Amino acid sequence: MSIYDQYETTIGLEIHVQLNTKSKAFCGDANNFGAAPNTQVSPVTIAHPGTLPRLNKKQVAAAAKLGLALNCEVHQVSYFDRKNYFYADLPKGYQISQDHQAICTDGYIDIRLKNGETKRIRIHQIHMEEDAGKSIHDQDPNYSLVDLNRAGVPLLEIVSEPDLSSPEEAHVFIAAIRQLVRYLEISDGNMEEGSLRCDCNVSVRKKGTTELGTRREVKNVNSMRNVKRAIEFERKSQIDLLESGKTVDQETRSFDAQKGTTSSLRSKEDAHDYRYFLDPDLPPVMLSTDYFAQLRAEMPALPQELFQQFTQEFKLSDYDANVLIEDKHLALYFLDLVAQKISPKSAANWMSNVIKSHLNQSQLAIQDFMVSPSQLAALIQLVESDQVNQLVAKQQLFPALVAAPNRKPLELAKKLDILQAASNEEDLEALVLEILQQHPDKIAKYKKGKKGLLGFFVGQVMRQTKGKVNPKEVNPMVAKLLDSI
C-alpha cells in the first residue's frame, strides 16, 4: 500500500458566484465583463468620502433563489458587515459582506458520482458580498496597475461543509453549482471570465483518526480542472510534510496553473483578523412571507427534479437524462418534443445525437436553433411511421429542414424524393440476388460465421435504392437469401 493511501482528504469549498445583474451591488455602475479599465466606476465605486451604498434588490432575489434551490433556511432578516483589510484594489479599505447573519444557512445538495452513488454535501451558508477590483502586474515593468471595474460587482459566496473527500467529488460539486446558477439564470457560471471562482480548503489526516488536520486554503482557482489539480497537489504536499516529520501550517496559498503547484501567500487569517462589524450605512435585509411565495412561484424545474422525471416517468437511462439536463433550455426543448406525442426514447436519441451534434458544429445554443419542437416532431414521425429511412432522415431531411425551418418535413421529403414506397417483393428479391452475386468472397466469409456482413449487404441494397425501401423488409430478405445460397 502506498503511503498516500494511508491518509484521507477533507475538502471544503468556497464558491464565489458573480451575478449577472445590470448594475453593481451597492451602486448603479454598470456590471459588464470586458469593458476598458476603469470605465465602469463612479464616486461610490471609488469610495469618495461621503458616498453611501444602496442595495441592489436583484442580488437579494438571486441569493434567496439559490438558497431555496440548495435546500437552505433562507432568513427573513439578515445583515451586512464590513470585512476590514487593506489591499490596493479595495478602494474603501473594507469589503461589504455578511458574517453575523448570512441570508442563507444550513442547506445541502445531493451530487451524483461516477460510480452511480449519491452523496449529500452540506452547505454551511450562502452570503451576499461585493467583489474587489483587479491588480494587474504584467503590463508595466515598474508598476502594478489597478482596474476598479470589478470593484463592487455583486457576488454570492457558497460555503460548503468539509464533506468532500476527493478531487473528483469537488469537480462534481462545482459542476452541480454551476448548473444550478445557470438554471436559475442568476449567473453564466463562466469560470474563464471569473463568473465562478473557487477557494479550496484542504486538509489530510491518517485513516482511522477523527480529528481534522490543519487546513490550507488555495485561493481563486478559476477552472474545474485546476480545482482538481490544486487539491491533488495539496494532498500530496501535506502528506509529504507529515511523513517527513514536519507540520502543516494554516495558511493561504495561490495555485500556479502552468506548474500545477501551490505556493504560500500569507498566514491564514481567522474571522477576528478581519474585525467584522455591522455596516452602519446599510439597514437589515427584511423579507416577507409574500416575497418568499413569489420567489417559489418563479422557480424553474431544477436539474434534480428533471433527472427524476426523465429516468422514472420517461424511463430514460441515467446517461441520457444527464445529457439532457446539462442545459436547462435543452431539457425544455426535449419536454416540448415529448409533448408532441414523440416517444421519450426517440426524442432523447435525436436530442443527444443529431441536435447536439448540429449545435456544436454550428456553435449555436439551443435557444438559437430555428427548428421548432413541432417541426422536429413531424420529421421524427416520418421515421417512426416508416415513411423515411432513419439514416436518410438524419443525412438529408434534417439538413434540409435546418435550411428551411418553416417548411413541412413531409413537403421536403417529397421534394428530396426520399419517401419509402411499398416494395415490390419480386423486384426487391431480384435486386438482392444481383448484389449477392457481386460479392462471392463476402458470402463465403458470411458462411464461415462472419454474420456482421449481413449489415454490409443490407447497406448495399439501401444504397442502390437510395434509401427508398424499408430496411425492416430488406433485413429478413437478405438473411433468408444468404442462408439459401
Image: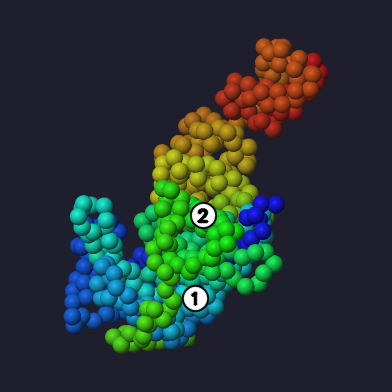
Q: Which residue is mark 2?
A: 233
What is the residue that sits farthest to the front in this orientation? 245
Q: Can the viewer see residue 424?
A: no
Q: How many marks?
A: 2
Front-most of residues 371 and 260: 260
Residue 125 is tagged as 1
Q: Could you say where residue 96 lies in the image, as x and y percent from the top left?
A: 33, 77
Amino acid of disc 1: Gln
The residues bearing labels 2 and 1 have C-alpha atoms spaced at a distance of 27 Å
Q: Residue at x 54, y 59 (%)?
A: 241
| Mark 2 nearby-residue class (10 Å; few <14, some 14–19, many ≥20) | some
Q: Earlier in the sequence, mark 2 or mark 1?
A: 1
For label 1, the SS is strand
Q: Can the viewer see residue 139?
A: yes
Left or right of residue 140: residue 209: right
Front-most of residues 101 and 257: 257
- Closer mark to the observer between disc 2 and disc 1: 2
Front-most of residues 201 and 116: 201
From what the image shows, is residue 281 above or below residue 267? below
The colouring scheme, among rainbow, by chain, secondary structure or one colour, is rainbow
Quarter that holds the C terminus: top right
Q: Could you say where residue 194 lies in the image, as x and y percent from the top left?
A: 37, 59
From what the image shows, is residue 359 above or below residue 454? below
